[in-house]
């Protein structure tokens, strides 16, 4: 099964939807499933990135009310800034940082997302070709699955003090370090959601806020990666490939929508250890089976 088709698209869509927002690496699972089914090569590598757009659309729908309030609030705050600064669109530093964050929380949240987005975006732009050529392999996924699982167990075993129990309390400094943590996810198998959630926990976010912030950070990160990858692959994809990609995106959207709600409820009551154990077992099995 080395060519796109409805059945393969549905399988990959289910895998993407199930794993995108869990700390287990959707890209890693897509690589493993593609390898198992014989779906490899340039089209497969491109599809494994592009199909993520469906899961991102699920976040937009699931968080539509918060996203609407965020954008509306940011627009109103921007208008008030323009009035206060002679139509300047820049945030002034005349007031204290805490005062500015309190009076313009939506603008600061968007600024934080931009800050968090930049590290992985910059590094990914530079290393994208090399990563896709050399690291999109089952062996890489196996090693990083084990490594990521060990990191999760270490972080969960460490006593931490939560300093942010709402999205409004996520500062630009928090955002920067979460963005640095997201750089690890450029390596297949490390997991974008896992990297950002663990990064959030390490900087003082509680588990639910770290998870939800990971959802929001996925929006610019994966949309940018998907648009970039699809544009680059436009000469590689045939009409049939684009049709299959559309099917996969629809399936991943539906599955991810259900997973987001369940996962947010889960992390309010449980640690991430079960995902760490799963990652370690998966990595060991892949190392033993794949040659």
Image: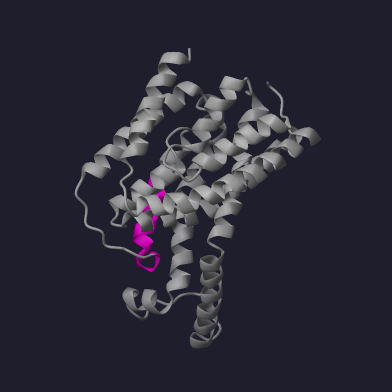
Give the quadrant of residue 163: bottom left
Span shown in magenta = 167-181
Q: Does the magenta-highlighted stretch encompass residue 87?
A: no
Give the quadrant of residue 8: top right
Q: Identify which residue, 86 or 81, lies in the foreground.
A: 81
Coordinates of residue 84 in the picture (x, y in percent): 48, 87
Coordinates of residue 52 in the picture (x, y in percent): 59, 43
Residue at 37% x, 58% y is 209
Coordinates of residue 156 in the picture (x, y in percent): 26, 44
Q: Does the magenta-highlighted stretch encompass residue 170?
A: yes
Q: Residue furthest top?
A: 291
Number of numbered markers: 0
Colour theme: one colour
Q: Would residue 55 be found to the left or right of residue 102 on screen? A: right
Q: Identify which residue, 223 or 149, lies in the foreground.
A: 149
Q: Would residue 224 be found to the left or right of residue 156 on screen? A: right
Residue at 46% x, 34% y is 187
Residue at 44% x, 39% y is 191
Residue 117 is at least partly visible in this image: no
Q: Would residue 170 be found to the left or right of residue 14 on screen? A: left
Q: Main secondary structure of the magenta part?
A: helix
Does residue 90 sit above or below 215 in this rendering? below
Does residue 140 sit above or below 98 in this rendering? above
Coordinates of residue 256 in the picture (x, y in percent): 55, 47
């Amino acid at each position: 099964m080395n060519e796109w088709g409805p059945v393969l698209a549905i399988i990959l869509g289910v895998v993407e939807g199930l794993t995108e927002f869990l700390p287990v690496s959707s890209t890693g699972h897509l690589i493993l499933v593609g390898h198992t089914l014989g779906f490899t090569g340039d089209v497969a590598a491109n599809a494994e990135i592009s199909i993520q757009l469906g899961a991102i659309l699920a976040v937009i729908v699931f968080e539509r009310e918060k996203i609407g309030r965020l954008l509306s609030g940011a627009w109103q705050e921007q208008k008030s800034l323009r009035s206060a600064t002679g139509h300047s669109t820049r945030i002034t530093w005349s007031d204290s940082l805490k005062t500015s964050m309190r009076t313009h929380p939506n603008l600061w949240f968007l600024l934080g997302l931009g800050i968090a987005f930049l590290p992985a975006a910059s590094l990914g732009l530079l290393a994208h070709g090399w990563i896709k050529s050399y690291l999109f392999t089952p062996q890489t996924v196996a090693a990083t699955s084990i490594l990521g699982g060990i990191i999760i167990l270490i972080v969960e075993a460490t006593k931490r003090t939560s300093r942010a129990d709402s999205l409004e309390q996520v500062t630009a400094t928090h955002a920067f370090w979460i963005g640095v943590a997201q750089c690890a996810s450029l390596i297949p198998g490390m997991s974008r959601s896992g990297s950002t959630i663990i990064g959030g926990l390490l900087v003082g976010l509680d588990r639910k806020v770290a998870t939800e912030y990971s959802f929001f950070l996925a929006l610019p990160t994966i949309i940018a990666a998907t648009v970039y990858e699809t544009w680059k692959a436009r000469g590689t994809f045939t009409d049939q490939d684009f049709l299959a990609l559309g099917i996969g995106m629809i399936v991943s959207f539906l599955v991810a929508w259900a997973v987001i709600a369940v996962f947010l409820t889960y992390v309010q009551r449980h640690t991430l250890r079960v995902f760490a154990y799963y990652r370690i077992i998966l990595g060991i099995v892949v190392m033993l089976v794949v040659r």
